[in-house]
Image (cartoon, grey):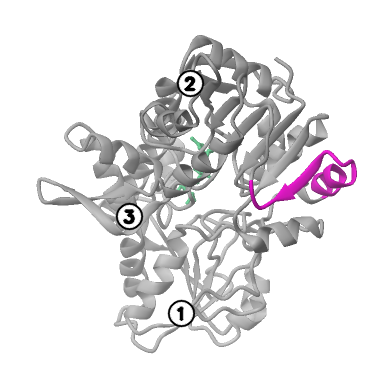
Amino acid sequence: MKFNKICILGLGYIGLPTATMFAANGVKVVGVDTNPHVIETLRAGRLHIHEPGLGEMLQKAIASGNLSVASAPEPADAFLIAVPTPFYENQTGEYRGQPYKKADMRAVTSATEAIVPHLRKGNLVVLESTSPPRTTVDLVVPILETCGLKAGSDFYVAYSPERVLPGQILRELVENARVIGGITPESAQAGVELYATFVRGPIHPTDATTAEMVKLMENTYRDVNIAIANEFARLAERFGVDVWEAIRLASLHPRVKILNPGPGVGGHCISVDPWFFVETAPDLAQLIWMARRVNDEQPHFVVEKVRRAFGQPLNGKRIAALGLAYKADVDDLRESPAVEVVHLLQQEGAVVTAFEPYKPENGLPGIHSAMSLEAALQSAEAVLFLVGHTQFRALTPAQLAALTPARILIDTVNVLTGSDWTAAGFQLWRLGAEKRING
Ligand code: SAJ
């Protein structure tokens, strides 16, 4: 099949790099977003998200005339849906008295509806948004068929999960293996031909529901493995063991690779996707559900640690919280456990000044953010490391001692390694190591 023009609905962390990549490879792309701010920013050649390398690529794509942005779809050879699928904030399901989170599919529904007036014979529609199993066949196809054409014979429909890592998106979009599930083998084949435009990794055709499940399995596998790392951290504290050392030694086994404990699991993927299994099969997804609970409780575990470091209630204590992003070296605060920790500390009466180097200007509602590391640290009694940003990892004891009167350091992400912090007068408390290290 020949794809001269494609329309990409949703210009976020996935849709925008994908649109830019297609445009850079010679395809005419119309990027569609319902948020006017996104459209204005992109038209001015600027980015509303942070992703290394994307800014230059976007400007070239716009200048070449291959990429344009619009607020509504238009006729094209293929349509890609890359809109968010968060869970409902105020609505939960319940199974045997336990609440579970439910996917909010309204953006997928309205993006699909927006395609209907433009759908022609021979078109391809691909859903990329992470979705509960069977979304393509049970939600997307029936909406598309309201145009009067038959999915699978008149037009093609496929599900293709994105698997890129924020911060590495441009490389991983090209190099990662890609799974493309069609509602028919011909639909999968059409999808393979579309993505072959820029994907250099192997492309694997399958059916749509398998592709949906594959995506959820990947992130659920990671969530469950982080949960066990977090549980190991709790156990290590109980037994007076340093979990980081124990993990390093256990991972010497050729078939064991333990992930890192931390303040919890955030981001828009791993903390969300496992719920799609729980929601659709709560009777079966018991282990997955428990892992979610362990990871969601982790910010409380951190607060308990901070309380122990002070040895007294946190009311009135001045704490510098370093990092608000959901993980190291990204600017994304979505579902961030660091933000949750700050809120919990404030509920205990602590006076928290946060510093997020990737978004110093963007104070979150209810969080007092400093514009610089210096400002965050200058009157703190304790410094709490919540994200392993490179900038924090590079701090030396002498630098930190010069920046803050605080002598209590609480490290939830193992950034304060390799130096003797005690010699510089600090007390170091690390997550997963109950005894004070070196002190
Ligand atoms: N985390 C830990 N310990 C670890 C690893 C991660 O606590 O050992 C935490 C991070 O700090 C963060 C969260 O887990 O809060 C998620 O981070 P991540 O780096 O594991 O994943 P994401 O959400 O940035 O990206 C994931 C990736 N999936 C997998 O690695 C299986 C990515 O490939 C997917 O494209 C993305 O989800 C997605 O969009 O689904």
Say whether disc 2 or disc 1 marks the residue closer to the N-terminus: 2
Q: Residue at x 34, y 39 (%)?
A: 276
Looking at the image, the residue that sits furthest to the right is 64
Reply above or below: 407 against 289.
below
In magenta, the rendered stretch is 56-72
Q: Secondary structure at mark 1?
A: loop
Q: Is any atom of residue 240 visible in this view? A: yes
Residue 309 appears left or right of 390:
left
**Is the shortest distance between ligand 1 and the CB of mark 2 under 8 Å?**
no
Per the rendering, the mark at residue 296 is 3
Q: Secondary structure at mark 2?
A: loop
Q: Position of residue 405 (x, y in %)?
A: 56, 85
Per the rendering, the mark at residue 151 is 2
Name the amino acid, label 2.
Answer: Ala
- Give the crowd class for mark 3: few <14, some 14-19, many >=20 residues within 10 Å: some
Q: Is any atom of residue 269 visible in this view? A: no
